[in-house]
């Protein structure tokens, strides 16, 4: 019996009743798709013996640096244990805005589920979240496929839905960038929105779906929206006469949905403009052989599209053009759309369109999941007319084999990858060639499903091991980190003083992961003013200035009210430090220069460093500091412990480091060779204590911090400049007006003021709320209008 694509007239809204049996079948298909996807990922991780199924850890790259720490901070927020709130983060970077980070890393509606797990199991929670997102992507795709057509066998939608969720992009890149997996879910959901627009149904649900997708992760949602737009055009070209109303309805849903998401989106977009710039890269298209090799299972690469889709998807899509029983318009529109999308990835102008007009710092093929979705839909479009016959099946096999042969020159086309590909192709081709009788249906389903699971699990396992070998890895969160977090919590005195998570670092956002209120911070939204301030004071960083490190220095501890820090395996008290708010004498703000030692003294208001005497030795009893931001290697003072410097190049900068106290007269430090300055200074702790005492004498009596700002009580009659030990990021107001600049610190001039109040509002929040309000009013008006017309 032949089945066809649904072609309900787009201009005639239909109630689309769904009997219980249909709903039950749809729920079963969605659940099966999700289970298949989870089974494949878990099987691959278990084969690789990686967390949580073996001794190898998953703590690589941004997964360890950003996603796990940010989810840990979300856990703290939801349990009332964080310093700050949804708009202001007091724990990292000396005090930064949090709404842009929330909108970039945590705004998925699934993210709060991590609060259900113990905090010590935060890595388990993030892994479970990754599996859940993969399962939902499979389920949503299965639902979409059932919606647009009927298949000759009920098991095809869940299998192909799982095939989409188990594409190479998901297994190789999305697995350690779980925020991107929200885009994997968004593509089939936005295609549903396109389908509803074509049919003229569910206008409110369409808007809400767009809003959820764009709020969850706007970056991949943007790519998914482009893909859904292509899907809509293809459906209009193949499922009936083209009507302008459908794209207008879809565009209206997108505009209103994005408007509802604007309170998150606008602050995120403005924050990216205020962030320290990352590395600017020019797009370079990957070689054809490498691109085709990534269609194979069990391949891994960083600068090529992870385009693997399992053999069932690839073969069905390859047969479509040769199936004469499928109307010509369907064959060529879907085939042409897939080819056009693939080609657009390799052309500079369209590459920029896919990536919001900026080549990303990292994988330049982040939109590849859209291609996987289009391949699944194209393959399923042919199934609407029954399984392929022997001739189109043979032609499809020839196409897949030709693509495989063209990939042979690539080093990515390894022997195991080729073997997996050919074996999978043979199994699926054999399943599709079986007689159309009930006795063979189970065998066909087993062959197709087994091929899907086997190829996906093998790709997962291969990617797991290659990631550990090729990406930066970090210690996993475990008992050692738990002890460190407990020690930091015991020493915490916020807001009387800060507790710094210290060195050695676990990851890029240790204050969020371990606790305290340190300077370390790593985000796409690291403020330029913060990077500039810490760099001027001798701070170190990686990721081209976006991953700021803790600066262990007594002077900066005094400047930022750090009263305790982790050092050498324990929490140490740094001595008496000024509070969070100090008052400086009236006069012009200091202007920072290139010398970090001098810059520290300018902000401190006193000279505490001296230059080494003679050939380069400091007076006995002083602490020797080295500033060599471009050097890499070990520095040492006499028989003291070596200090490792990691600087050089545009991506990293070594922090000012203490080489220890000078105990032997005339001892000269050993400094690694290299380019750039290597300056030595001698810190006189007696002078530093005198300077701190002077600052404490003209500082706030008490400081209270909140989720949106701070209030400080000053001695009566205080005049001068009240300086807050926090970066002057955009969004602050103090005493109801814009703050006064003070060398990158938050400050306000006062005269006889007893109280200083500063409030933080993320830039763009007001405009975003206004846009959301307009969207709500339009929706209410449209609903009222429909109700009137119905009556």
Image (tube, helix red, strand yellow):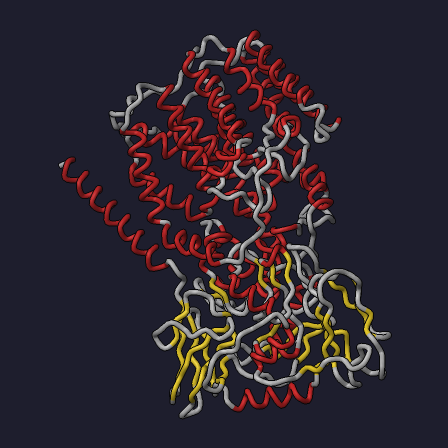
The quadrant of the image that shows the N terminus is top left
Q: In this rendered view, identify the residue nearer to me: 23 or 217.
A: 217
Q: In this rendered view, identify the residue nearer to me: 584 or 702.
A: 584
Q: Position of residue 25 (x, y in %)?
A: 43, 28
Q: Position of residue 359 (x, y in %)?
A: 54, 43
Q: In the shown orientation, is residue 426 left or right of residue 623?
A: left
Vertical order, 216 against 627 (above or below): above
Vertical order, 593 against 434 (above or below): below
Instruction: Answer yes or no: is residue 706 visible.
Output: yes
Instruction: Answer yes or no: is residue 71 visible.
Output: no
Q: Residue at x 45, y 53 (%)?
A: 103
Vertical order, 574 against 27 (above or below): below
The quadrant of the image that shows the C terminus is top left
Q: Position of residue 468 (x, y in %)?
A: 71, 46
Q: Residue at x 41, y 92 (%)?
A: 716
User: How many numbered tags mark residues here?
Assistant: 0
Q: In the shown orientation, is residue 570 left or right of residue 525?
A: right
Q: Position of residue 547 (x, y in %)?
A: 60, 59
Q: Residue at x 52, y 76 (%)?
A: 725
Q: In this rendered view, identify the residue nearer to me: 240 or 117.
A: 240
Q: In the shown orientation, is residue 232 left or right of residue 316?
A: left
Considering every residue shown, the one lying at the far front of the view is 614
């Amino acid at each position: 019996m032949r089945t066809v694509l649904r072609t309900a007239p787009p201009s005639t809204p239909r109630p689309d009743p769904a009997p219980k049996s249909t709903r039950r079948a749809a729920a079963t298909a969605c659940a099966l798709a999700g289970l298949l996807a989870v089974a494949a990922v878990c099987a691959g991780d278990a084969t690789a013996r990686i967390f949580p199924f073996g001794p190898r850890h998953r703590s690589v790259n941004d997964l360890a640096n950003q996603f796990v720490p940010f989810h840990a901070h979300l856990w703290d927020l939801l349990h009332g244990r964080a310093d700050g709130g949804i708009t202001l983060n007091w724990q990292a970077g000396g005090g930064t805005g949090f709404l842009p980070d929330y909108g970039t890393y945590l705004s998925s509606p699934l993210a709060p589920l991590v609060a259900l797990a113990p905090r010590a199991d935060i890595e388990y929670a993030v892994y479970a979240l990754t599996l859940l997102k993969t399962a939902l992507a499979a389920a949503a795709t299965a639902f979409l496929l059932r919606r647009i057509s009927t298949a000759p066998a009920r098991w095809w939608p869940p299998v192909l839905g799982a095939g989409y969720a188990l594409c190479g992009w998901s297994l190789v890149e999305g697995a350690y960038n779980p925020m991107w997996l929200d885009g994997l879910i968004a593509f089939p959901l936005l295609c549903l929105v396109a389908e509803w627009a074509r049919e003229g149904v569910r206008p409110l649900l369409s808007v809400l779906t767009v809003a959820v997708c764009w709020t969850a992760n706007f970056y991949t949602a943007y790519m998914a929206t482009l893909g859904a737009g292509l899907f809509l055009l293809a459906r209009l070209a193949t499922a009936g006469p083209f009507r302008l109303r459908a794209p207008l309805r879809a565009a209206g849903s997108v505009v209103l949905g994005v408007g509802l998401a604007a309170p998150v989106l606008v602050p995120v977009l403005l924050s990216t403009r205020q962030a320290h710039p990352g590395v600017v890269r020019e797009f370079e298209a990957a070689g054809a052989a490498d691109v085709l090799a990534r269609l194979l299972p069990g391949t891994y690469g960083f600068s090529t599209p992870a385009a693997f889709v399992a053999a069932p998807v690839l073969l069905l899509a390859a047969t479509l053009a040769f199936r004469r029983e499928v109307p010509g318009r369907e064959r060529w529109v879907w085939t042409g759309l897939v080819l056009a999308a693939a080609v657009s990835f390799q052309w500079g102008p369209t590459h920029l369109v896919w990536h919001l007009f900026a080549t990303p710092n990292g994988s330049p093929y982040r939109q590849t999941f859209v291609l996987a979705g289009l391949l699944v839909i194209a393959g399923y479009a042919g199934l609407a007319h029954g399984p392929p016959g022997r001739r189109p099946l043979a032609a499809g096999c020839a196409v897949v084999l030709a693509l495989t042969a063209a990939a042979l020159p690539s080093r990515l086309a390894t022997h195991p990858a080729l073997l997996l590909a050919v074996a999978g192709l043979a199994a699926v081709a054999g399943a599709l060639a079986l007689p159309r009788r009930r006795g063979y249906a189970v065998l066909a389903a087993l062959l197709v499903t087994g091929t899907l699971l086997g190829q996906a699990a093998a790709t997962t396992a291969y990617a797991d091991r290659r990631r550990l070998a090729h990406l930066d890895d970090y210690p996993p969160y475990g008992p050692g980190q738990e002890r460190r977090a407990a020690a930091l919590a015991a020493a915490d005195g916020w807001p009387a003083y800060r507790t710094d998570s210290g060195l050695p670092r676990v990851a890029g956002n240790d204050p969020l992961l371990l606790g305290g209120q340190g300077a370390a911070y790593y985000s796409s939204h690291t403020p330029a003013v913060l990077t500039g301030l810490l760099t001027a004071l001798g701070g170190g960083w990686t990721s081209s200035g976006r991953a700021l490190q803790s600066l262990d220095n007594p002077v900066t501890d005094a400047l930022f009210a750090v009263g305790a820090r982790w050092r050498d395996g324990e929490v140490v008290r740094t001595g008496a430090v000024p509070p969070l708010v100090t008052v400086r004498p009236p006069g012009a703000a200091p202007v920072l220069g290139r010398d970090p030692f001098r810059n520290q003294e300018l902000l401190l208001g006193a000279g505490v460093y001296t230059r080494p005497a003679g050939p380069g030795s400091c007076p006995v009893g002083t602490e020797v500091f080295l500033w060599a931001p471009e050097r890499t290697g070990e520095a040492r003072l006499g028989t003291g412990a070596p200090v490792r410097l990691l600087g050089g190049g545009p991506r990293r900068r070594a922090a000012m480091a203490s080489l220890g106290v000078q105990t032997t007269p005339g001892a000269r430090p050993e400094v690694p060779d290299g380019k750039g300055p290597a300056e030595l200074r001698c810190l006189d702790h007696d002078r530093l204590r005198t300077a701190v005492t002077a600052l404490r004498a003209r500082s706030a009596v008490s400081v209270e911090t909140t989720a949106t700002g701070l209030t400080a009580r000053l001695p009566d009659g205080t005049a001068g400049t009240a300086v807050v030990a926090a970066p002057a990021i955009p969004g602050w107001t103090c005493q109801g007006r814009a703050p006064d600049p003070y060398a990158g610190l938050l400050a306000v001039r006062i005269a006889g003021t007893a109280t200083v109040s500063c409030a933080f509002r993320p830039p763009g929040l007001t405009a975003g709320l206004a846009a959301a309000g307009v969207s709500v009013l339009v929706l209410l008006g449209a609903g009222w209008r429909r109700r009137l017309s119905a009556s």
